[in-house]
Image (tube, helix red, strand yellow):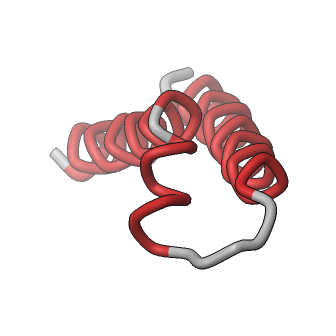
Amino acid sequence: MINIIIKILLLLIILIGVILIYDARILTKRFFSFGDQNEGSSGLKILGFIIVIMGGIVLLFISK
């Protein structure tokens, strides 16, 4: 039972990472006041990519 809950939480973390990748420009406009919007959106995309990769690796090792 705990294993299923951990898998669901990891899938939610991966989903958050994917949302950061695809909606980076919208989130940058809404929450931050950067002078250069491209730097902020690329930072969020990199953060989302790292979150997705780490969540996927952990999910891979948990499922075995």
Left or right of residue 17: residue 41: right
The image shows residue 27 at horizontal and vertical percentages of 45, 55
The residue closer to the viewer here, 36 or 64, is: 36
The image shows residue 15 at horizontal and vertical percentages of 38, 35
Q: Which residue does the image show at 60% across and 78% down from the upper left?
A: 33
| Residue 45, quarter of picture | top right
The image shows residue 24 at horizontal and vertical percentages of 55, 43
Left or right of residue 1: residue 25: right
Left or right of residue 1: residue 41: right
The image shows residue 14 at horizontal and vertical percentages of 47, 37
The residue closer to the viewer here, 64 or 56, is: 56
Q: Which residue does the image show at 49% across and 59% down from the upper left?
A: 29
Tally of numbered tags: 0
| Residue 36, quarter of picture | bottom right
Q: Where is 30 relative to 38, above or below?
A: below
Q: Which residue does the image show at 72% across and 32% down from the upper left?
A: 53
Q: Where is 35 relative to 6, above or below?
A: below
Left or right of residue 55: residue 47: right
Q: Where is 42 relative to 39, above or below?
A: above
Q: Which residue does the image show at 56% across and 75% down from the upper left?
A: 32
Q: Residue furthest front?
A: 35
- In which quadrant will I find the C terminus? top right
Q: Residue furthest bottom?
A: 33
| Residue 59, quarter of picture | top right
